[in-house]
Image (spheres, helix red, strand yellow):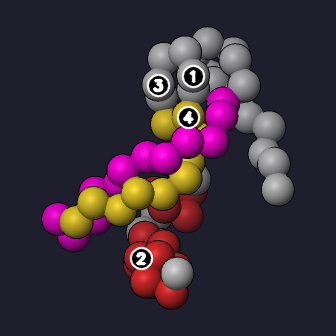
Amino acid sequence: MSIALDCMKCGVPMELGKVEVMYLNNKFPIELLKCPKCGMVFIPEELATGKMLEVEKALEDK
Ligand SMILES: [Zn+2]
């Protein structure tokens, strides 16, 4: 599974990396696309629109 996405700012390909996301006062380490140059994190729409609960569940299952 690979998603090719360029940083809108730098135009360099973003890389998958562990990112800590805050949700309900808890930190969740998840893998997100990140710009290696400026560190900007690409937040998928599902996360931005409140599907974090599913991410939380997925983490518990592991
Ligand atoms: Zn960048």
The reply to whether dot 3 and dot 1 touch (C-beta < 8 Å) is no
**Residue 53 badge:** none
Alpha carbon distance from label 3 to label 4 = 6 Å
Position of 52 with respect to 16 (left or right) is: left
19 falls in the magenta region = yes
The reply to whether dot 4 and dot 1 touch (C-beta < 8 Å) is yes
Alpha carbon distance from label 3 to label 1 = 6 Å
What residue is disc 1 on?
36
Report x, y in % for residue 27: 27, 60
Which residue is rendered at x = 41% and y = 76% of the image? 56
Number of marks: 4
Tell me if the residue at label 3 has its CB under 8 Å from ligand 1: yes
Which residue is rendered at x = 49% and y = 47% of the image? 18
- Tag 4 or tag 2, which sits nearer the N-term? 4
**Residue 39 badge:** 3
Question: Which span is picked out in magenta?
Answer: 14-25
Could you say which quadrant of the image residue 50 lies in?
Answer: bottom left
Q: Quadrant of the N terminus?
A: bottom right
Which of the pair 52/17 is nearer the observer?
17
The reply to whether dot 1 and dot 2 touch (C-beta < 8 Å) is no
Vertically, is 28 above or below 60?
A: above
Q: How crowded is mark 1: few (under 14 residues within 10 Å), some or many (20 or more)?
A: some
Alpha carbon distance from label 2 to label 3 = 24 Å
